[in-house]
Image (cartoon, grey):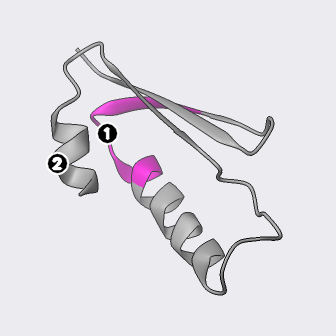
Amino acid sequence: MLEEVLSMVKPGGMYIIDDLNPQPNWPEGHGDKVEELITYLESRNDFFMSKLNWSSGLIFMTRKM
């Protein structure tokens, strides 16, 4: 439902996602899914994006105006 969620972010609005750094309790294969998600989000040109290696790993995105 990622596309649906991102389409709801208005220009200037924010999308925040966490738990992006590898965790010991992740099920097998989850790390690959997280990497795919990050790669996809980085490819979008309708958002500004900042990645933070803080706590469990965060991405802050703001829809371009």
What residue sits 21% from the left and 17% below the top? 11
In the picture, measured across the screen, residue 21 lies left or right of residue 16, that is: right
In the picture, measured across the screen, residue 56 lies left or right of residue 65, that is: right
Question: Could you say where residue 32 lies in the image, as x and y percent from the top left?
Answer: 59, 77
What residue sits 56% from the left and 65% below the top? 34
Task: Tell which residue pokes out farthest to the front in this image.
Answer: 25
31 versus 10 height, above or below: below
Q: Please rate how many residues cluster around mark 1, counting C-alpha atoms within 10 Å: few if below 14, some from 14 to 19, many from 20.
A: few
Q: Please rate how many residues cluster around mark 2, counting C-alpha atoms within 10 Å: few if below 14, some from 14 to 19, many from 20.
A: few
Q: Quadrant of residue 63?
A: top left
Which label number is shown at residue 63? none
- Tell me the residue that label 1 is attached to: 45
Stretch in magenta: 41-50
Q: Quadrant of the N terminus?
A: bottom left
Q: Quadrant of residue 5?
A: top left
Q: Amino acid at mark 1?
A: Asn
2 versus 18 height, above or below: below
Foreground pick, 24 / 53: 24
Q: Quadrant of the C terminus?
A: top left
Mark 2 in CB contact with mark 1 (< 8 angstroms): no
Question: Regarding mark 1 in the picture, which secondary structure is present there?
Answer: loop
Question: Regarding mark 2 in the picture, which secondary structure is present there?
Answer: helix
- Tell me the residue that label 2 is attached to: 4
Question: Could you say where residue 40 lies in the image, as x and y percent from the top left?
Answer: 41, 59
28 versus 45 height, above or below: below
What residue sits 23% from the left and 27% below the top? 9
Q: Amino acid at mark 2?
A: Glu
Say which label, 2 or 1, has the lower sequence index: 2
Distance of mark 2 from mark 1, alpha carbons?
Answer: 17 Å
Q: Is residue 34 magenta?
A: no
Question: Could you say where residue 56 lies in the image, as x and y percent from the top left?
Answer: 75, 45
What residue sits 30% from the left and 17% below the top? 13
